[in-house]
Structure formats: C-alpha cells, structure tokens
Amino acid sequence: MTLTSINPASGDTLATYPEMALGEATQAVEKSDRAFSKWRESSFQIRSDALKRAAQKLRSRIEEFAKLMTLEMGKPITQSRAEIEKCAWLCDYFAENGQDFLKSELVKTDAQKSFIAYEPLGVILAIMPWNFPFWQAFRAAVPALMAGNTMVLKHASNVPGCALAIEKVFGEAGFPEGVFQTLLIPSSSALSLIESPLIKGVTLTGSTGAGRAVGAKAGQFLKKCVLELGGSDPYVILEDADLTQAASISMMSRLLNSGQSCIAAKRFIVLEGQKKRFEDLCIEEMKKAVIGDPLQESTTMGPLARQDLAETLHHQVSQSLEKGAICLWKGSIPEGNGAFYPPTILTQVKKGMPAYDEELFGPVAAIIVVKDEQEAIHVANDTSYGLGAAVFTRDIKRGEHIAQTRLNAGSCFVNGLVRSDPRLPFGGVKESGFGRELSHIGIKEFVNCKTVYVK
C-alpha cells in the first residue's frame, strides 16, 4: 500500500510513499521505548538545547517547509511561512520555560519533606490532522519531548511529505534516534497501536468522530489521552460593538487557512438593529479575498485540502439554503481544476440548518440574528462544540465578564481573533474534546504528577 500526496490546487500527484505495515510500526514503538529509557535521564539543558536547534532548523529552511506545506494541502504561502515561524517560537518558548514548569513543588505537611515531582510517562502516540501540518504536530511534540517523553507521529494521510520533514527536523536538531519518529500508517493501525503496553498516552487533534474512536480505545486500555476536536466558534457582536472592527476580525478569522481551522469563527451572532450594516461590512471584507494559486504571494485564499471536502461543504450550504437560509455572497463550486470553494456568507441561519448545527470546515460564514444579549449568549452556547468564542463590545468590563462567565468554550476572546498561543492553555469542552495543550498546563498532561513523602 502507498500514500499519495496530491496538490489540491491542481489535482496533480506530488509523490507517493510506502505505507508501513503494522508490524513495522510496532517495531518503531519498541525503538521509541528504548530511546525513552535514556531520554528520560537527559538533563533539561540537553532537551532545551535540542529544541533551540530545532527552532534554528525551522527558520533556516522556512521557504522549503512552507512550499512543501502549500503544495500538499493548499495553504497560501504567506500563511505557511507564518506557521513555520510559529513552530520555531513554540520550540524556543518551551526550551526557555520547560524546566521551570516541571520543577518539583514543595508542599508543607507533617512529613520531614513532601513534594510533587513531575516525571515523564514514556512513548506518546500523536495522531494529527492536515490543516496545520507543522503546527499541530509541533504543538503536540514539543512539550512532550521537553518533559522527557518520546513520541511516534501518525500524521494525516494527505501530508506525508510534511510528516517526514518534521521527523527530519528533530533528527537534525540532535534529538537521539528514536525519540521522535513518523509512522506512515493508516488510522486502523494507529488504533491498534493504542493497545500496545508501550504506548503510555495518546494525543489527537481531529474531528469529533475521530475523537470518539480514539477516546474509546484509549479508555478501553486505560491510556491517558488529550483530544482537541472540532469547533463551531461563535462570535457575538453586541449592540455597542465597533461593527467595522468586528466585521474585519470576523471575516479574517473565517477565511484564515481557507476556512479550515477548528478554532476559526464560524457563527456570527448579531442583533437585529445591526444586521444590515454588519452584513454589508462582511461582504466588503469577503470581496477583498484573493483566491488562486497558493504559491503566489498575492493569494490570500487557496483551495480546500481535498476535493471531497469542497463537495461536503457545498452540500451543507445547499441544505441550509433549502431550509430557508439566504446566500448573500457566492456559495457555489467554481468550474476548473482544484478543490476551490469561494468565500460565502449565509444569513437568516436558524436552528435545524447545517450552518447552525454543524461545523462548516471551509470559508462559509453563518450569520444568526437575535433580539438581545441574552438570546445572543444562548445561541452562542447552543452547540455541541466548545472550542473557542469571542465577544465584541466597547465596554471592556462587560466583554470580560461575558467571556469569563457566560460563554462556554475553552478559549474566549474579547474584541479579538481566537487563536492559540504557546503561553496559554489550548483545548475545548463538550464535543470539542478534553485536556489541554501548550503553557505550563499542557506540558503536565503527559507526566506522572508524583507525590514524594519523606517521613
């Protein structure tokens, strides 16, 4: 069996890669376990230096890696460069802060000495998606490796070139052989690997369906897991919001990565009195999108990652229109090659429509009209997801209160674009998953928080 990398902008085959048999993948896990026995004993300084070298490798080859990403999944080249730079920042951040995050914590008890120690678990299996091919994998790997774990990566089948390039970065940065390995395996093999007693934890970024399958298997075999799943992020635009700012930020979020982001803005909740003005502003922002060859510097929106994704998205749009939604802008698959889908705005979106109830993984904005703040908050939380949310208001205290206490999501922003940051924990609630990545919280997901008590 082989994995085929296809350019979604043209439909051309880029390369084919041999798929690993389950037995070969199992041997790789055994190799990772052997590497763990030594890596766990390495000093924080050794791990930190290796991460800093990884950051240097990323920056020195930014054009190479950005082009590879753009060719394999269609991300505009300027966004691909930004993704590589963000991965380098992540490496630097944990290189500089990881030791402090994991230092033992003294706790006063009746013992002579008692403290909490943070010890690595072992081999972590990472199952990662295609939409941010470098960032998602580095986001999982960097804290885990800094903590002294080793990792095997099962990446999405349409970005095998990126998966192998990531392994090469860690190898060239001086991480010992076996500490980080890419496994070109199908999803069925990844589920089988969870059963291995050598796998001590599983981290998945992907769909809610994938999360259910991985979570069930991890639970069956009592493996710690972190699940970062889908999202249908609401952006609440209150009556005192700066509508020009809100529309600009909202559409920027909706179109980033051609709309293919779990944490992108997807549902826009606006009060009746602002509906027409907000719609007009959103259309103006959508018109600014430059759609085309993602390798061109001027392109701001490329194709979706696969043709079937464009077809699925269009089906959701069509069903929403059949149920009474109104299309304000675009909303049809263009002719020609490539998995392109235009920036699209739907309004009069209501409960029972795919645009309200489901995650639209592409450049489609769903505008929902409400009568007041109370209804706006209800609609924002009326979803099975809970990854991110934002509120727009000129009253900062009001916005902070709503973000902290009334919006039910893992990341809530006021007057800003919801995004991940190495300094802050990242993850969701409800069907958006559980556990956290990044920050001092994320690095402790795959460690043994060990009590040591000296009488």
Image (tube, helix red, strand yellow):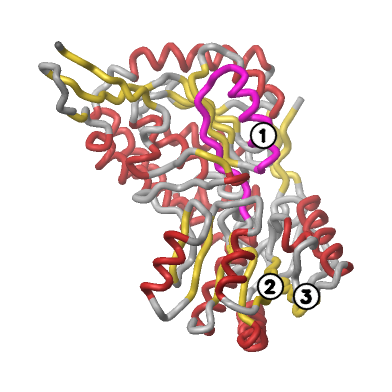
Q: Which residue is mark 3?
A: 330
Q: Are marks 2 and 1 in contact (CB under 8 Å)?
A: no
Specify the amino acid type for callout 2: Ile
Determine the image quadrant of residue 337.
Answer: bottom right
Q: Which mark is first along the chain, 3 or 1?
A: 1
Across and down, in percent, residue 101 comes to 27, 37
Across and down, in percent, residue 353 comes to 79, 62
Across and down, in percent, residue 294 comes to 63, 62
Q: Is residue 20 above or below residue 401?
A: above
Query: Label 2 vs label 1: CA separation?
Result: 29 Å
- Residue 212's disc is 1
Q: Which residue is mark 2?
A: 368
Determine the image quadrant of residue 359.
Answer: bottom right
Is residue 18 at all visible to an observer of this figure?
A: no
For the residue labelled by badge 2, is the local secondary structure a helix, a strand or a loop? strand
Is residue 188 at all visible to an observer of this figure?
A: yes
Q: Quadrant of the C terminus?
A: top left
In the picture provided, is 192 more to the left or to the right than 204? right
Q: Which residues are magenta?
A: 207-231
Query: Label 1 vs label 3: CA separation?
Result: 34 Å
Q: Is residue 402 above or below residue 436?
A: below
Of residues 152 and 317, the one drawn nearer to the viewer in this rendering: 317
The 10 Å Cα crowd at callout 2, few under 14, some 14 to 19, many 20 or more, is many
Specify the amino acid type for callout 1: Arg
Q: Which mark is first along the chain, 1 or 2?
A: 1
Q: Are marks 3 and 2 in contact (CB under 8 Å)?
A: no
What residue is rendered at 48% in x and 38% in y? 435
In the picture provided, is 173 more to the left or to the right than 251? left
